[in-house]
Image (cartoon, rainbow, N blue to C red):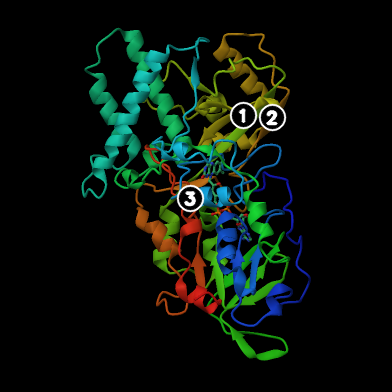
């Protein structure tokens, strides 16, 4: 995304100019079919690894580095954890093959833990009245929320689920149960406030503005892989790049149009005809037999009508429109000294006057910061200093992107003073944040199965074109590497293990 300024290690920063229609460099070197990959994130690099022996492969990347939404510089701006790190997880397998996992992460015992796809971090919960909330009160409400999410599994494949969205279902259940809660008014209110915070956390996990947008029936389809979540190795993209022939990736090569039903010839080579021509923003163009498109769904939502010529068949266009793609941003705050107890790795936040049974505020300017779910303590402090990473999803996260650094910093300083009850709490000395919604080649953070769509739409998106399937020209891996988190906190990391259509592999020399 546009939010990460680090350049990739071995990729060429611009194409040797070959003039329109000329695919220069590695692709020219050998015979056989030519394959272009649009993008150089993990999905593209995974595809390239599978196809590299063909030697006629080129990746065109809009940005100045490889990795896409895995983007580590001063801090990791994208993927944070390998969820469910165990043998069934392709990212985990690759990271362990390259020796990139942190100490202990590769322990077989850790791989067997059923963590439900969530990082298990020792936590403390701050309330908006400036006190630390009772762990018992918080954990009771959290357990209730997690039971409610687990119960969504009942509706997988249901023809008439009790509500269209996860949010509507969960809120209706909370309203029903709340009528029977014993205890005083204050503990009822606190329980509702914690449940409200749980819904916000779920928005971050699902990458959505509101759980009212996330479809109920497909929600329980995700399966959690076993394993104790570990840190996502930010160097993975560079390691994957290092295994590709020099010059395979062209950086700063934004693709404008994919023409996929033509008969294109190169100057001076009239005997060879290519069905695909990929045209770039800078005027360069490349001919190919096959193209694999790995651009994010957010980009496709905005651009698919002009991006593909001819336009995509209606069923694919519909999948692009219906699937959800939302924003989850990170805000890193660095402190001179920690104000938190070093035993804790997660500082959670509860606004004590909120309730899932009341309409949330729509006044972004006044209340955007209340969507922040809390902070992960970046580990280890000896390496990174005293750094907290806040998470915020949805329209509030997109609004945050429009504010200046100084505004974000002063707002969060005020919030932390409120939460800790310490009006003298020193301001953070540095702040760094992501702006995934503004990044023109990403336009958000990750995808979810929205009301009106189903898991099938993800498969529809991945089906090669043309639809008769005999000779795929366009394959899409967009969002095959999606974070498909659900209440059970599950990841669906699929791209690296997604089959590339076999005619494409065979024709590229892998039988
Ligand atoms: C804040 C955040 C937190 C996350 N946390 C986690 C996590 O904890 N665990 C996890 O597993 N996942 C997480 N993810 C999701 C994970 O990062 C993505 O699912 C994954 O990186 C997507 O890989 P990809 O290759 O499909 O897409 P991308 O990495 O987005 O790659 C697509 C590439 O295509 C390029 N591109 C786009 N348009 C064009 C064009 N027109 N021409 C040329 N190139 C183009 C882009 O620049 C980009 O490099 C997180 C993501 C974000 C944003």
Q: Residue at x 63, y 48 (%)?
A: 439
In the picture shown, does residue 64 fall above or below 58? above
What is the CA distance from the residue labelled 2 to the residue labelled 1? 7 Å
> Along the line of sight, which residue is nearer the eye, 444 or 380?
380
For label 3, the crowd category at 10 Å Cα-Cα, with few meaning under 14, some 14 to 19 and many 20 or more, is many
Tell us which disc is closer to us: 3 or 1. Answer: 1
Which residue was labeled with disc 2? Answer: 384
Q: CA distance from mark 3 to mark 1?
A: 24 Å
Decide which of tag 2 and tag 3 comes sooner along the chain.
Answer: 2
Q: Judge the density around disc 1: few (<14), some (14-19), many (≥20) Cα neighbours within 10 Å.
A: some
Q: Residues within 10 Å of mark 2 (few under 14, many from 20)?
A: few
Question: Which residue is nearer to you in this view: 166 or 35?
Answer: 35
* Element marked by disc 1: loop
Query: Outermost residue, bottom direction?
Result: 271
Q: Position of residue 36 (x, y in %)?
A: 61, 70
Q: What percent of the width, then of the height, locates residue 34? A: 61, 77
What label sits on residue 445 in the rendered view? none
Q: Which residue is mark 3?
A: 482
Question: Is ligand 1 closer than 8 angstroms to the Cβ of mark 1?
Answer: no
Q: Nearer the viewer, residue 227 or 173?
A: 227
Q: Secondary structure at mark 3?
A: loop
3D distance between C-alphas at marks 2 and 3: 28 Å
Sequence order check, earlier mark of 3 and 1: 1
Identify whether 315 is placed above or below 115. below
Residue designated by label 1? 378
Q: Is mark 3 within 8 Å of ligand 1?
A: yes
């Amino acid at each position: 995304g546009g939010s990460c300024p680090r350049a990739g290690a071995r990729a060429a920063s611009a194409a040797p100019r070959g003039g329109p229609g000329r695919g220069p460099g590695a692709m020219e070197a050998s015979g056989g079919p030519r394959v272009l990959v649009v993008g150089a994130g993990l999905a593209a690099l995974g595809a390239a690894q599978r196809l590299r022996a063909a030697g006629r492969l080129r990746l065109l990347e809009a940005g100045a580095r490889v990795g896409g939404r895995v983007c580590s510089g001063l801090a990791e701006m994208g993927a944070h954890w390998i969820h469910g790190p165990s043998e069934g997880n392709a990212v985990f397998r690759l990271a362990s093959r390259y020796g990139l996992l942190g100490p202990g992460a590769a322990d077989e015992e850790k791989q067997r833990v059923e963590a439900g796809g969530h990082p298990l971090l020792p936590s403390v919960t701050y309330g908006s009245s400036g006190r630390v909330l009772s762990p018992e009160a918080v954990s009771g409400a959290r357990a209730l929320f997690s039971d409610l999410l687990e119960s969504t599994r009942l509706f997988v494949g249901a023809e008439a689920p009790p509500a269209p969205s996860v949010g509507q279902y969960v809120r209706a259940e909370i309203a029903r149960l709340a009528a029977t809660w014993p205890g005083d008014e204050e503990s009822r209110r606190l329980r509702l406030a914690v449940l409200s915070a749980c819904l916000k956390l779920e928005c971050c996990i699902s990458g959505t503005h509101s759980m009212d947008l996330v479809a109920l029936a497909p929600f329980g389809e995700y399966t959690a892989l076993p394993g104790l979540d570990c840190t996502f190795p930010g160097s993975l993209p560079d390691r994957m790049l290092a295994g590709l022939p020099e010059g395979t990736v062209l950086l700063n090569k934004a693709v404008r149009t994919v023409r996929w039903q033509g008969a294109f010839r190169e100057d001076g080579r009239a005997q060879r005809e290519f069905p695909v021509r990929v045209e770039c923003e800078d005027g360069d163009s490349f001919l190919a037999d096959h193209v694999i498109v790995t651009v994010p769904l957010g980009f496709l939502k905005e651009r698919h009508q002009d991006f593909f010529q001819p336009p995509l068949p209606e069923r694919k266009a519909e999948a692009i429109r219906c699937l959800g793609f939302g924003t989850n941003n990170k805000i890193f705050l660095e402190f001179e000294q920690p104000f938190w107890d070093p035993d804790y790795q997660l500082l959670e936040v509860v606004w004590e006057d909120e309730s899932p049974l009341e309409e949330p505020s729509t006044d972004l300017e006044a209340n955007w910061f209340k969507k922040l779910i809390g902070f992960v303590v970046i580990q280890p402090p000896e390496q990174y200093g005293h750094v907290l990473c806040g998470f915020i999803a949805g329209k509030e996260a997109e609004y945050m992107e429009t504010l200046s650094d100084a505004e974000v910093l002063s707002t969060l300083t005020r919030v932390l003073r409120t939460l800790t009850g310490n009006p003298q709490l020193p301001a953070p000395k540095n702040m760094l944040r992501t702006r995934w919604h503004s990044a023109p080649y990403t336009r958000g953070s990750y995808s979810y199965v929205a009301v009106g769509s189903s898991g099938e739409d993800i498969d529809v998106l991945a089906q090669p074109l043309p639809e008769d399937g005999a000779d795929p020209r366009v394959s899409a891996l967009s969002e095959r590497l999606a974070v498909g988190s659900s209440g059970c906190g599950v990841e669906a990391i699929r791209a690296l293990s997604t089959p590339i259509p076999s005619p494409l592999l065979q024709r590229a020399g892998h039988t």
